Image (tube, coloured by chain):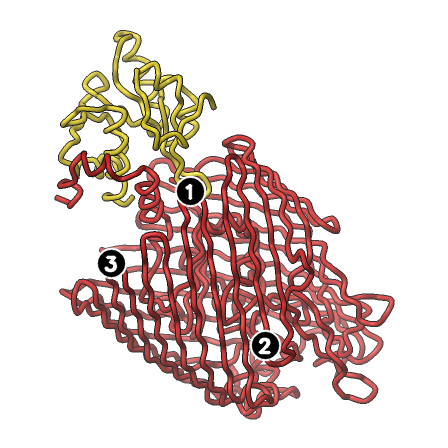
Amino acid sequence: MLAIGFLSMQMLHGEAMDTLLKEYKDKNDLSQRTIDENKGHLILFTRDRLERMHAKTLKDVLKMTPFIYYHENRYGLPDPLTSSLFEPYRSNFIRLFIDGVEITQGWLGSGVVLYGDMDINFADHIEFYYMTPSLETSVEPAYMTIFIYSKEPEQDSGTSLDVLAGSRGYNVQDVNYGGKENGVSYMLNVSRTQEKRERIDNGTEHPLKRDFERLQLMGYAKTDTQTFHIQLMQKNTDALAGLSMDATPEVSEIDYQNIHLDYRYKFASYWQLQFAYDMLNTDIRMSDDNPLLYSGVLLGNDFYGKSKNSTYSGELTYTRQWGNHRIATGIKGRIKKLDYFKEKRVGNVPLIFDREDIWSVFFQDQYHISKNKLLNVGVEYSRICRNSPRANDDDLLQIRLGYIYSGEKWRYKAYLYRSMFALDPFSTTLNLSTFNLHKDPHTLQKTWGVTQELGFDGEHYSANVMLFLLQDKDGLLQNGGDGNTRYLTTVFQYNYRFDLENRMDLQLYYANYKDIFTLDRLEDYSGYLTFSNTYGQFDFYNGVVWHQNSIDDKNYFDWTSSVSWNIHENLTLTLKGENLLDKAKKTDLYRIDPATGTLMPPLKISPIDRRVSIELEYLF
Amino acid sequence: MDIKSTLKVYNKLFSILVPNKQTVHVYVDDPDYREIFSKADNIAFARDIGEADFVLVTDPSILRQFQSWKQTHPHTSAILFATKYSLLEANKDVVGALYWRKGRPQLLFLLPRLKAHHIRLPDEFSNYAVPSL
């Protein structure tokens, strides 16, 4: 019988309802079911936190996370690790999972390419795991994993309608419906976004554009043993600078169509079988008065191309508790196929290879030294095969050793690991062609890391410190550097709860890089301070995100503020302002002078638009 | 659901809504709540609404059962408490509800309905009681 059986009524009379509800909230939050402390160093955004922030897209959350930030590349795509130079994409080692299944763009790499600014109205909570992702979940190596978990009908049954309107004609319509019948839980979310963004002055009469229209559908049906997901996205974009060297395109547009399907089956107590299918169609329209990047060598000033790639993923895993050992092992595979890549004038564009297979086998043991102490060891071997004699096959080995202590108040984690990374297929193709993005196209990146985390939970507050020491060898996409970067990063978090409805959150981050790009040293600082308050029927949120680095020593401040009027239990009206000071961090977009071939002064672009919006939400 | 924290909240509610009872007889249909309440020494399951001190309304069928019972037993003293706002709205015999709204648990009592059962809430519950929906 639980300890609760010994609680007397006198004790319960003494404990205030506020305190009991706070404990009830913390213990029953849906994130408690999905958090896996063994996956790595966790930064969690609970449902309550996302609601108080009025986070409507993954971008709103990414801009708050340490180590990375929400950046966009020259195509206007979410690319947190972009160098703003000319690589196609740089954030492939940040991997995105929805309800535990990876969303991947296969040939183009990580699912963050398309989903990095997705609508998250379907989401309950988001977990970020840093630096040491669990070998159980990733088919391909990653140094950061983002896990988004959908709402559940037990806390969100029925229908919600959400409409937003904002600056420059920005508007969103969203409907969410969920329920549970006869043991089957289901949820469907459909959203349409018409994003009207700030134009970027490029010194011509035609400023750069990054507007888009998106239709997104997220759905699932599940029982205790089976889960099925479907995700669809149609995104038509103005692609910012696109392939224009000097960022003065005459035409720069890309349309995307994406399908994701997955099925998971748990059987015989210990086994799990999972299949996923991802498909991406792109329609690229580029034109300039000078030869374009990459394609200009052959095609000159225009590129009108279409591509389709399909990715098939499967895994079979076995997980079992044997005494104090929790053993997990399994085999995972992924086939990435470039179905076609054609240009209007030349037809099929020949590439060095058009298929890449990845097969991984992993073993992990989590050993409980005692009730509070856990030791874990894991190893994963991956083989990457490409269908061309010019493209080497690669062998990757990931090794991880970790220790976790979880007490009533104190928490501690430490990891020692070695990871290996290979380029995504598209970048590998470019590497093997004319455009050497790396000095040796067959190099694999190795990263060694020693990471630690210490946390404390008080009655009204929690505090957390993370310290990471990392070393890259033969780093991929180094843009002029030698790829042997060493870095120290540290994060401090402090959360204080005044009561059930009012809280403060503080985060500070510092990173010191040695030998990154062409710099001997780079220091990066960031942080945020947020307040969530409730007075009567009104909820208030104020948050400031701050950035500074040693490149320009400039302070950037992104202030978000919102007030919600809970008119009725089922009806809420919200007024929100983003980047109100218009001082959010800017990303450099580099340009080449076509006449001289030299670098021009970069354009400085904030990926966070200054915007005011009004939202009406109705639940029934 | 977390058993310990859920039982703490419900035991606190029992102490206010069904005071001075060593054992509270609860009528509940939902298997998740039945599993939680089975862990407590001071809770017994009522076989029907007539035996119950406290009826946990988790779906509309419980309300229909109560209405049928009330037709033949108009002076029933059982306290009805809901797990959804819609169930609190649907029937004036439901005195309060504990439910989730946008990631936050909501506790709500209706003062006129409590008054009908001669229940007076302690001051610490003042933030959770409203005169009407």
The amino acid on which the numbered mark 2 sits, given as a three-letter code, is Asn
Instruction: Say which mark, if any, is on residue A408.
Output: 3
The amino acid on which the numbered mark 3 sits, given as a three-letter code, is Glu
> What residue is pinned by disc 2?
A549
- Relative to A329, is A533 on the left or the right? right
Query: Alpha carbon of mark 3 to alpha carbon of mark 1: how far?
Result: 24 Å
The amino acid on which the numbered mark 1 sits, given as a three-letter code, is Arg
* Tag nearer the camera, 2 or 1: 2
Q: Residue at x 57, y 37 (%)?
A: A565
Q: Quarter holding the N terminus of chain A?
A: top left
- A275 or A441, nearer to the observer: A441
Q: Residue furthest right?
A: A205
> What residue is pinned by disc 1?
B104
Chain A image colour: red
Q: Residue furthest front?
A: B123
Provide the secondary structure element on which disc 3 rests: loop
